[in-house]
Image: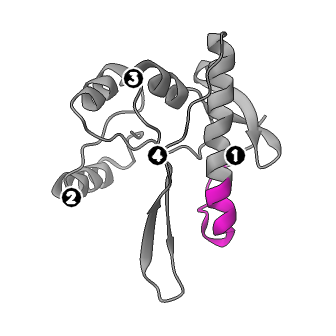
Amino acid sequence: MRRPLQPAWFEALINKQFEKSGFKSLPKTGSMESIMNCLEAGHAVVFPFDQHAGGKSSILVDFLGHPAGTFRSLALIAIASGAPVIPASSWRDENGNHVLRFEEPLQLVESTSAKEEIRLNTRLFNASLEQMVLRHPDQWWWVHRRWRN
């Protein structure tokens, strides 16, 4: 899932590379039905989670000790679908090789309140991201303001 890139020729190039590698790109906005269909078909959905989120799609939960606008959609998708959330990160090792590491699936937190369940699970996802960032903080690609609130 991602937003289209600019300029249009760059977006076309990225999509071509994705498709060549066996990936499909879903638009970030209005894609819930597509995501659920992908999950039902047994496909994995990659969800970039380290971005600032604002507006109604966000919830304020801690990230590295500070409140951060975070997308609630991953919690909504995981709760609604029952699909496992498997954190993954990549980095370059001391030999210049790229390493891709998958963590154990996260155990979702249940609550009697839907709003609280979304908040608790979104915080769980941020905590997992914190662990990955802190393993290789020098390689976290910081290109946005994560704490805009």
Task: Look at the image and give the residue range highlighted in magenta.
Answer: 131-144
Q: CA distance from mark 1 to mark 3?
A: 28 Å
From the viewer's perspective, is the residue at label 1 or at label 4 nearer?
4
Q: Provide the secondary structure element on which disc 3 rests.
A: helix
Q: Please provide percent x and percent y for residue 102.
A: 45, 57
Q: Please provide percent x and percent y for residue 108.
A: 56, 31
Quick one: label 1, few (<14), some, or many (20+) residues within 10 Å?
A: some
Q: CA distance from mark 2 to mark 1?
A: 30 Å
Pick the residue in front: 80 or 104: 104
Residue of label 3: 81
Q: Are marks 3 and 2 in contact (CB under 8 Å)?
A: no
What residue is shown at x 68% (from left), y 27% (from top)? 120
Q: CA distance from mark 4 to mark 2?
A: 21 Å
Residue of label 1: 146
Q: Are marks 2 and 1 in contact (CB under 8 Å)?
A: no
Classify the position of the C terminus by image quarter.
Answer: top right
Q: Are marks 3 and 4 in contact (CB under 8 Å)?
A: no
What residue is shown at x 59% (from left), y 43% (from top)? 51
Q: Please provide percent x and percent y for residue 60.
A: 73, 29
Residue of label 2: 21
From the viewer's perspective, is the residue at label 4 or at label 2 nearer?
4
Q: Looking at the image, is 97 positioned above or below residue 119?
A: below
Q: Is residue 54 visible?
A: no
Q: Provide the secondary structure element on which disc 4 rests.
A: loop
Q: Provide the secondary structure element on which disc 2 rests.
A: loop
Q: Which kind of residue does numbered mark 2 sit on?
A: Ser
First in sequence, mark 1 or 4: give its number.
4
First in sequence, mark 4 or 2: give its number.
2
